[in-house]
Amino acid sequence: MRHHNGNITRGCQILITAMCGFAPLFAGCDECTLGQTHCEGDARLDCYPPEDGAFANNTLHRVKCPVTCHEADGKANCVDTRAPIPECAGDHDICLDGVPTSCIGGYPSRHSQCEGPTHCMLSATCFRAICAIDDKGPPNCSFEPSCDGSVLTTCQCDLVVARQDCGAADLCRKVGSYNRCTETAAPDPRCGDPLSLSSNFCDGDTVVECHHGYTESHIDCGSVGYTCGVTGGQASCEAERTGP
């Protein structure tokens, strides 16, 4: 019996060796260390854990860079130029042509273009380039929105990244776990239990969505030829009944 087990073990070893000899065909044989990255031409190779399979190992996933790949400090990154640029003389964030950009070993790696009222700003707190409106946030402003009078303000790295005027101080309030703008100064009784996370009701042919007792959004069913109806305690747009 032991003789047969030894044959089976040797057979498995031969099978695995043969399979890994065809590594391009079997991703499971692409062994690597989790977190490992390196460049291969203009592509970045990232090491991922196995998904499944009896002989699964960590595998390398190829990411094609828009321009090229550059290795610095043991990590591979997609960068936006094939040569270092003077603006990236130090490994820090910069605003390059109005776009938040990380410098990696002298090479730029741009982030998303700023939109709306934001523009690229450098934070002296986080030493990062981010899209922000200005640096005139209220005290203790954070990424969790806060009410500054009637203005709902969100900050990141001590810079204001979002600002919304609620219209009045009593319309900017904490609802549930977060501050937000409300349509009314008090909960709407038609929303039902104010402790309920979400609910809705019909206001004519409009579905009104509620959050912790405050009206939040409106869906005009009539504009698309439907009517608002309640089924199982939930309001929704329904096709208008034409028969009995």
Image (cartoon, helix red, strand yellow):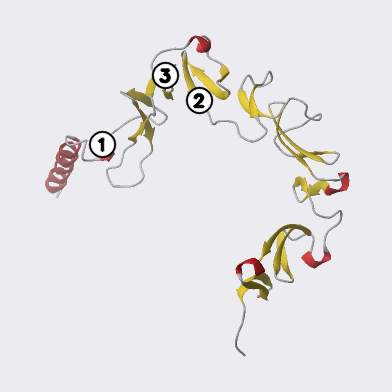
Q: N-terminal of the two: label 1 or label 3?
A: 1
Q: Is residue 171 above or below residue 134?
A: below
For the C terminus, the image quarter is bottom right
x, y percentage for residue 181?
78, 48
Relative to 55, is 19 on the left or the right?
left
SS for callout 1: helix
- Disc number at residue 81? 3
Residue type, label 3: Thr
Relative to 116, is 68 on the left or the right?
left
Q: Residues within 10 Å of mark 2 (few under 14, many from 20)?
A: some
Q: N-terminal of the two: label 3 or label 2?
A: 3
Q: Is residue 34 above or below residue 28?
A: above
Residue assigned mark 2 = 110
Q: Residue at x 67, y 62 (%)?
A: 219
SS for callout 3: loop
Q: Residues within 10 Å of mark 3 (few under 14, many from 20)?
A: some
- The Cα atoms of the two marked residues, 1 and 3, are separated by 33 Å
x, y percentage for residue 94?
57, 18
Relative to 174, is 36 on the left or the right?
left
Residue type, label 2: Arg
x, y percentage for residue 238?
61, 74
Residue assigned mark 1 = 29
Q: Quadrant of residue 74?
A: top left
